[in-house]
Image (tube, rainbow, N blue to C red):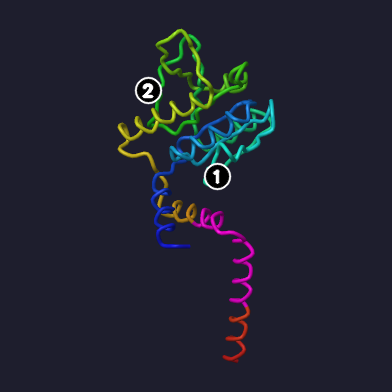
């Protein structure tokens, strides 16, 4: 790997976060799914949770442009399993839902670890997500239309969230040095073709050298 590539990975890892995650709760349009993948990567999100109640999750490579390589995509068959995973990560659930009582997206508690949930295109968030949510938010609309395509809404929400996190916390990326090192190692394996085979061969050669050295010492 060239030094310039390694430097780029280091800079990207410094801007990554696990305290802000995206959840796609029953989203079925594959273009929407793939577009959200690309937005997540572009805004430094590491964890994308996909609940496949309406359709299996498939990557549209022409849309993602390889962005999925840099994310951890978690897949679930039921929302309850996703909710348990979010709770284990201590992420507060917030729903994208323009229902009465929801707050503007800029007013979300961005300084806390949160998961932003975007529901099915027609039905919205699942009942399970609604029961476990800390609140709902909406993007202010000035025209006759009162809703946005999910991928557009996710992009606007992430742009707002990143700006608010930097304003309130002074930064967006929040991984420790050890977490960044682990992430870079993971990325390097994904970036190099046949990485696992190469590592296996190198480990075998090193083991052989160690055995030879041990025999010489004896």
Residue drawn at x 42%, y 46% is: 175
Number of dots carrying numbers? 2
Badge 1 marks a residue whose secondary structure is loop
Which residue is tagged 1? 66
The answer to which quarter of the image holds residue 214 is bottom right
Whether residue 19 sits left or right of residue 213 in the image: it is left
Image coordinates for residue 26, horizontal then vertical, percent:
64, 25
Position of the C terminus by quadrant: bottom right
Determine which of the numbered discs, if any, sits on residue 76 in the image. Answer: none
Pointer 2: residues within 10 angstroms few (<14), some, or many (20+)?
some
Image coordinates for residue 5, horizontal then vertical, percent:
44, 57
Residue drawn at x 42%, y 13% is: 141
- Magenta residues? 185-207
Residue drawn at x 46%, y 7% is: 144
Determine which of the numbered discs, if any, sits on residue 106 in the image. Answer: 2
Image coordinates for residue 75, horizontal then vertical, percent:
64, 37
Whether residue 14 sits left or right of residue 152 in the image: it is left
Image coordinates for residue 192, horizontal then vertical, percent:
55, 59
Q: Are marks 2 and 1 in contact (CB under 8 Å)?
A: no
168 inside magenta stretch? no
């Amino acid at each position: 790997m060239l030094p310039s590539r390694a430097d780029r990975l280091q800079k990207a890892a410094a801007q990554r976060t696990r305290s802000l995650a995206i959840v796609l709760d029953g989203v079925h349009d594959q273009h929407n799914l793939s577009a959200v993948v690309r937005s997540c990567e572009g805004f430094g999100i590491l964890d994308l949770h996909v609940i496949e109640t309406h359709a299996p999750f498939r990557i549209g490579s022409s849309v993602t442009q390889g962005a999925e390589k840099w994310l951890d995509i978690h897949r679930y068959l039921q929302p309850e399993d996703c909710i348990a995973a979010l709770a284990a990560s201590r992420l507060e659930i917030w729903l994208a839902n323009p229902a009465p009582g929801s707050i503007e997206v800029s007013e979300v508690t961005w300084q806390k670890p949160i998961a932003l949930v975007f529901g099915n295109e027609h039905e919205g968030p699942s009942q399970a997500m609604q029961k476990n949510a800390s609140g709902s938010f909406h993007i202010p609309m000035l025209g006759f239309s009162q809703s946005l395509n999910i991928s557009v809404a996710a992009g606007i929400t992430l742009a707002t969230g990143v700006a608010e996190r930097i304003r309130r916390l002074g930064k967006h990326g929040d991984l420790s040095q050890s977490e960044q090192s682990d992430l870079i190692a993971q990325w390097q394996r994904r970036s190099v073709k046949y990485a696992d085979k190469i590592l296996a061969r190198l480990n075998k050669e090193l083991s052989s050298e160690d055995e030879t050295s041990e025999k010489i010492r004896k």
